[in-house]
C-alpha cells in the first residue's frame, strides 16, 4: 500500500510447515514486512534467510536469539509448542511486542500465564484462526441451545500424522462452546475415550473422537444425534492458508489495540 508503513511481523517456528506458510503470507502482504524469524536452538535452519525457500535471497535470517529476533517486530505470530510459545511471550511482554498465538495443547496453568502476559501487551489467542471455524462456533452455540434435550453430542476431529496433541485445540474449543451453551462445565461432562464395556451413554456427556493419519489438514464435525434424525455441522480445512490468513487478520487487529487478551470473536466482530 503506497504511503502506508508496513506492520513489522516476526514469525516463530520459521522452518516448520506452518511457519513457512506464515512467512509466505507475510511476504505476500503489501501492508506487512517480515521483521524476524525464530526457530529452536540446534535447528539446521539457523542463520539461513527466512524467505530463501521462496527464492528470495537476503533479508531476515532465522535465529534462536529471541531478543534479536523480536527487536524490530511489532507483532509475533506463533504456531509452535506451549513451552516455546510461553518463552516467546515472556520476551514479547518485556519488549512490548504484541502476539498472535495459534499454538494448541496448553494446560489451564499455562493459559493463566498467557492471561498474565496479556496484562502487559496485546495477545490474540485462538486455537483455530480460520474464519470458517469461528463462524461454526457461533452456529454451535445456537444449535446446542435448540437441541439441548433428546440429542447426544459428539465431536469428531481428524488431523495429520504429525500432530502431537489430542483432541485438537479446536475440538476442545468446540466442546467448550457446546458445554457453555448447555450450562455445563466441559471438564465434568467430556468423554475422551471409550473402550470395552462402557455401559449406556450418559445423555449429559459430550464425546470426543480423534483420528490421526496422512496429511489431513484439519476436519471437525459436531454430531447432534437424536431419535430419527442427525444433525452434523462440519468444517474441513483443505489448506493451511486459511489459518495463515486468519493470523494476518489478527495481527492487523492487534496493531490497533493496547494490552489485553483477545480472541477471534474480537478480530471478526462476532462478539
Image (cartoon, rainbow, N blue to C red):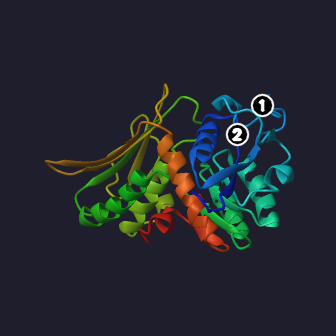
**Mark 2 crowd level (few <14, some 14–19, many ≥20, 10 Å Cα):** many
Q: CA distance from mark 2 to mark 1?
A: 8 Å
Q: How far across and down, in percent of the image, does residue 269 sit?
A: 44, 69
Q: Nearer the viewer, residue 163 or 69?
A: 69
Q: Is residue 44 visible?
A: yes
Residue tagged by mark 1? 45
Q: Residue furthest front?
A: 2
Quadrant placement of the N terminus? bottom right
Residue lying at 50% horizontally and 68% vertically, measured from the top left: 266
Front-most of residues 109 and 134 = 134
Label 2 SS? loop
- Determine the residue positioned at 31% across, 62% down: 144
* Residue, disc 2: 14
Q: Is residue 128 visible?
A: no
Does label 2 or label 1 sit earlier along the sequence? 2
Q: Position of residue 53 (x, y in %)?
A: 67, 29
Does residue 52 appear to the left or right of 250 in the view shown? right
The outermost residue toward the top is 214
**Count of picture labels:** 2
Amino acid at each position: 500500500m503506497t504511503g502506508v508503513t508496513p506492520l513489522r511481523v516476526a514469525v516463530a517456528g520459521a522452518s516448520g510447515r506452518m511457519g513457512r506458510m506464515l512467512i509466505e503470507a507475510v511476504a505476500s502482504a503489501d501492508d506487512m514486512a517480515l521483521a524476524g524469524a525464530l526457530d529452536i536452538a540446534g535447528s539446521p535452519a539457523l542463520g539461513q534467510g527466512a524467505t530463501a525457500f521462496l527464492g528470495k535471497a537476503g533479508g531476515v535470517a532465522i535465529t534462536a536469539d529471541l531478543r534479536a529476533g523480536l527487536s524490530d517486530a511489532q507483532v509475533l505470530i506463533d504456531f509452535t509448542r506451549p513451552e516455546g510459545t510461553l518463552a516467546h511471550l515472556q520476551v514479547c511482554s518485556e519488549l512490548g511486542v504484541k502476539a498472535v498465538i495459534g499454538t494448541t495443547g496448553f494446560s489451564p496453568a499455562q493459559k493463566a500465564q498467557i492471561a498474565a502476559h496479556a496484562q502487559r501487551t496485546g495477545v490474540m489467542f485462538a486455537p483455530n484462526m480460520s474464519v470458517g471455524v469461528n463462524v461454526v462456533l457461533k452456529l454451535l452455540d445456537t444449535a446446542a441451545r435448540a437441541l439441548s434435550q433428546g440429542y447426544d453430542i459428539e465431536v469428531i476431529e481428524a488431523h495429520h500424522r504429525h500432530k502431537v496433541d489430542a483432541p485438537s485445540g479446536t475440538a476442545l474449543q468446540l466442546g467448550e462452546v457446546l458445554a457453555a451453551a448447555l450450562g455445563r462445565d466441559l471438564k465434568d461432562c467430556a468423554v475422551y475415550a471409550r473402550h470395552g464395556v462402557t455401559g449406556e451413554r450418559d445423555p449429559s456427556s459430550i464425546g470426543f473422537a480423534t483420528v490421526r493419519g496422512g496429511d489431513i489438514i484439519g476436519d471437525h464435525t459436531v454430531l447432534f444425534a437424536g431419535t430419527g434424525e442427525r444433525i452434523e455441522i462440519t468444517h474441513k480445512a483443505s489448506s493451511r492458508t486459511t489459518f495463515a490468513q486468519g493470523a494476518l487478520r489478527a495481527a492487523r487487529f492487534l496493531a490497533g489495540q493496547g494490552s489485553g487478551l483477545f480472541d477471534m470473536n474480537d478480530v471478526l466482530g462476532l462478539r
